[in-house]
Amino acid sequence: MVYVIPDTHLGHENIKKYCNRPNKFENLIEKNWQEVITGTDTVIHVGDISFDEKWIERLGSWNGKKILVRGNHDKKPYDFYLSCGFTAVVEELVMDIKNVVMLFSHRPRFGHDYDINIHGHQHNLAVYDDKRLYLPLSLEHMGYKPLALDDNFISRLKPFIINNRQPTLKEMMSMGQGAIGKPSDKDFYDGFGKEIFTQSKARLKECYEILENAPYNSMQFRYRLWRNAIRYIEGKISKQEFLDVIRKFL
């Protein structure tokens, strides 16, 4: 069986405040993992294991084969994670499970060309992109348990793929993310508030229009351009700075 888990942040004290995690949440994650995962299972960790080497090593010893899709906090060399017990360390992962082609990434991958992008990073269920399908994962909503990509999960997911329709918040919660119950504003607006979230969505729409019409030929530049687009979407660079980046690739 294949499972997925996001954003464990083991040993990260501030995450308890940011995400209202209980004391000793690490022990809860370990307990749930060890009770569910067997030696023949594969767990896809979609990033942000821990800042602490000892916690990384500890998770690496837990049951199952482990694949790390690196997050923004996973900054150790690849070899370190492999030495801790991970089978593979990647930036993104694509899997076809029962004819559903899933892209696993840490952050949402805008502009992706797969059936759906399963990602973490946000710790909520907000979706920015209206042009692609996404399933954001929140470990808090998951009850600190790995999520099984089993027949039940796939059967719930397939109708959205077939109809090209983004799951609603309620539908995402029904796919293994109903532990918290009633969603908060954070799940609608990614914790930044409606105004900033709406502004970011508008910038994302601009990026699609710009990149879909950019006269570049090589697809090898697509990922790099979207990385800079995210900086514009997040307000870290201006639109002009983003356009200047694009010109370098023409």
Image: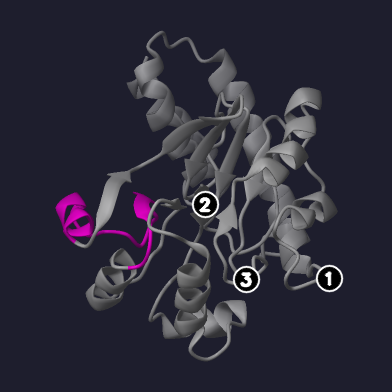
Q: Is residue 246 above or below residue 192?
A: above
The answer for how far apart the CA atoms under marks 2 and 1 are is 24 Å
- Residue 152: give x, y in percent of width and height: 72, 45
- Residue 72 falls within the magenta-colored stretch: yes
Q: Residue at x 73, y 52 (%)?
A: 175
Q: In this view of the protein, which residue sits in the foreground, 186 or 237? A: 186
* Label 2 vs 3, first from the N-terminus: 2
Residue marked by disc 3? 140
Please state the horizontal and vertical placement of residue 190, each as a whole percent of the image.
67, 60
* Amino acid type shown at disc 3: Glu
Which residue corresponds to the image point at 43% horizontal and 23% vertical from the top-left? 222
In the image, taking residue 222 as reference, residue 90 lies left or right, namely left
Whether residue 105 appears in this view of the structure is: yes
Q: Position of residue 207 (x, y in %)?
A: 59, 31
In the picture, measured across the screen, residue 114 lies left or right of residue 47, that is: right
Tell me whether circle 2 and circle 1 mark residues in contact (CB < 8 Å): no
| Numbered label tally | 3
Spatial CA distance of label 2 from label 3 is 16 Å
Q: Is there CB contact under 8 Å for labels 2 and 3? A: no
Q: Nearer the viewer, mark 2 or mark 1?
A: 2
Q: Quadrant of the C terminus?
A: top left
Tag on residue 182?
1
Q: Which residue is mark 2?
A: 3
> Residue at image x 35%, y 52%?
65
Give the mark, 2 or 1, whose residue is nearer the N terminus. 2
Mark 2 falls on what kind of element? strand
**Looking at the image, can residue 241 be seen?**
no
Please state which amino acid type lies under the numbered disc 1.
Lys
Q: Amino acid at mark 2?
A: Tyr
Which portion, as a residue range, is magenta? 62-83
Element class at badge 3: loop
